[in-house]
Image (cartoon, grey):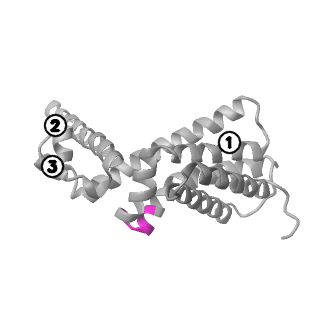
Amino acid sequence: MTANRRRQVDRTAATRGLLVDAARVLFAEHGFAEVGTERIARAAGVTRGALYHQFDDKVALFATVLEAVEQDVMGRLVSVVDAAAAAGVTDPVGLLVAGTDAWLDACADPEVQRIVLLDGPAVLGWERWRKVGERYGMGLVATILTEFMDAGAIARQPVEPLAHVLIGALDEAALYVARAADPDAARAEVRTVLHRLVAVVAGPIDAP
């Protein structure tokens, strides 16, 4: 790659990063519908033409922002589970509970609530939004379950459907809290439900 080409690539990446960062703040504070592309470009310090050079439209920019938030959330979950393991938590129920609580804590973040839980399905459509969530959460959950099964910590069972059930429960729990009139009370309720679900998942299976 020539020096000029490298500089052009760097400038493009920098512009894209400025737009994503600016849009992330504005979408979190005001919601997708209330933020126009002119406002995003101004906040990023670039022209509106530069925005459309990087993204086909505002929805494409939002999708990139959502991906960035999802990546951060997954990073937080991995850190919490790793910290629990480092602190001596070895039983599957304890580690899954730590991950579940970390998910609920992350979803209490106004940025996550607005971008991922409320605007995500409305802007991208349910199926596309669900696929984004699965792309990040499904791999993490499936990996954890597989490691537990390989270690003999939980009963051997089909990983993919089990991971789908858990992801579905976590997503619905987060949506329930985000839409509740009393989020704190709703969060306490779903935490109890999810802990019980995890205890069942990580326990023995008597029937085939």
Residue, x 66% and y 54% (percent of image)?
189
Say if 9 sits above or below 187 in the image: above
Circle 2 crowding by C-alpha within 10 Å: few under 14, some 14–19, many from 20: few
The numbered mark, 1 or 2, whose residue comes first in the sequence reads 2
Q: Nearer the viewer, residue 99 or 192?
A: 192
The numbered mark, 3 or 1, whose residue comes first in the sequence reads 3
Q: Which residue is mark 1?
A: 98
Outermost residue on the bottom side: it is: 208
Q: Are marks 1 and 2 in contact (CB under 8 Å)?
A: no
Q: Are marks 3 and 1 in contact (CB under 8 Å)?
A: no
**Place of residue 194 in the rendered image (x, y in percent of width and height, measured from the top left):** 69, 55
Q: Is residue 62 left or right of residue 9?
A: right
Secondary structure state at the residue bearing disc 2 = loop
Q: Nearer the viewer, residue 147 or 34?
A: 34
**Place of residue 4 in the rendered image (x, y in percent of width and height, measured from the top left):** 13, 33
Residue, x 71% and y 34% (percent of image)?
85
Q: Which residues are magenta?
A: 124-129
Q: Residue 12 is drawn in which quadrant?
A: top left
Circle 3 crowding by C-alpha within 10 Å: few under 14, some 14–19, many from 20: some
Secondary structure state at the residue bearing disc 3 = helix
Q: Nearer the viewer, residue 50 or 148?
A: 50
Residue, x 47% and y 62% (percent of image)?
131
Q: Residue 57 is drawn in which quadrant?
A: bottom left
**Place of residue 141 in the rendered image (x, y in percent of width and height, measured from the top left):** 62, 52
The amino acid type found where label 2 is placed reads Gly
Residue 38 image label: 3
The amino acid type found where label 3 is placed reads Glu
**Placement of the N terminus among the 4 image quadrants:** top left
**Placement of the C terminus among the 4 image quadrants:** bottom right
Q: Which residue is mark 2?
A: 45
